[in-house]
Amino acid sequence: MELQRSLPDFERAHIALFAISYDTVDVLAGFAAKHGIEYPLLADAGSKAIRALGLFNEHVYAHHAVYGIPPQDHHWGVPYPGSFLLDEQGRVMQKRFAQSYRERETGVGMLEQGFGIKSAVHGAEARAHTEGVEIGAYLDSTTYRFFQRLWLTIELTIAPGLHVYGQPSPAGCMPLAIEVPPMAGIVVGTPRFPPPHPYHGDGLEGDLFVYEGKVAVSVPLTFTQEGDDQTVHVTIRHQACSTTDCLRPSTMTLSLSVQAADLIARPRRR
Amino acid sequence: MMGPIDFSQIGPAVGDRFPDGILPDQHGHLVDLHHARGHHRALVLFHRSAAW
């Protein structure tokens, strides 16, 4: 259902979308009708293709036991849940699979993190401005579901003529750092930084590693509890310099709200 | 206690052509995956079930 929301993004980017499960055509027809699904849901009834592809999950009972769930007949036959990103020649560019079968990404996450394409439907953005640097932060979505992985994206737009230090930074200069404090019910993953590029500072020993222009850092957040609405705080530290001077180090905290999707569907009495 | 799964060893490998396949869609029409995607990139998602 949630992937349907990203379908215009995928169509705009000319990326074909396919979902495969062991359901029958009838089950998929009902699901598609109920949720207005317009991309292909492919029926691998009997799990023949799943098996032929080597994706048959033989450990499905053990995976459920990790969560205290007893084996159930309908578990048998499922694939490992995940996705393949194919290039224009149909070759596998990337595989996105999680260790826990429960964890699932959003369409926005797969588009932005997998294909590097900006989504038009990601969550609302929080913005801040420091001297020489604009900062924006957003989540894949303004709502979360149980065990969903949402990516927190932080974008810096650095004014021309300035650069921000990456790691390793020269002594006394603050490198770009992103911190998300621990939150109950959310597993915060390691931030993914793009590689900085070498910059030969005038009169300075050795290479510096810097970012210029636009930089995007992503932090994976996995929502492991069904709970309440949450607020995600992110602290961005950086120091911007020109070839001659450095501005003061900056520390900025942005906050983003994310609502529990199931609370919206079935509001609890408080 | 199960160890972590090495997904690089499971299913089609990065760099390999995704295998050809024909499956029916929700309308009962047969879909040839590579033919349907044309010359475009694709996302092929495997999920557990639409029913549960």
Image (cartoon, helix red, strand yellow):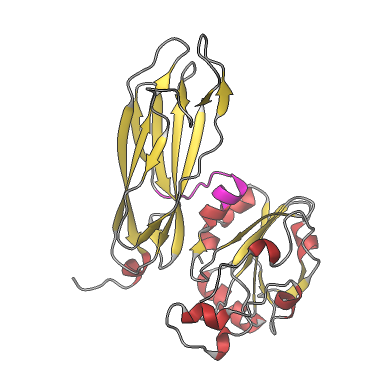
Q: Position of residue A199 (x, y in %)?
A: 56, 20
B5 on left or right of A64:
right
The answer to whether A33 is drawn above or below residue B45 in the figure is: below
**From where the camera sits, is residue B39 visible?**
yes
Report if residue A119 lies within the magenta region. Answer: yes
Residue at (42%, 18%) from the top-left corner? A241
**Magenta residues?**
A111-123
The spot of residue A52 in percent (x, y) is 76, 75
Quadrant of the image occupied by residue A61:
bottom right
Q: Where A264 falls versus A136 (above or below)?
A: below
Question: Would you say residue A38 is visible in this rendering?
Answer: no
Asked if the magenta segment contains residue A116, the reply would be yes
Q: Residue at x 40, y 12 (%)?
A: A245
**Front residue of A76 and B20:** A76
How would you classify the magenta stretch by its main secondary structure? loop
Q: Residue at x 49, y 18 (%)?
A: A160
Query: Image height check: is B44 above or below A194?
Result: below
> Between residues A219 and A15, which one lies in front from this camera angle?
A219
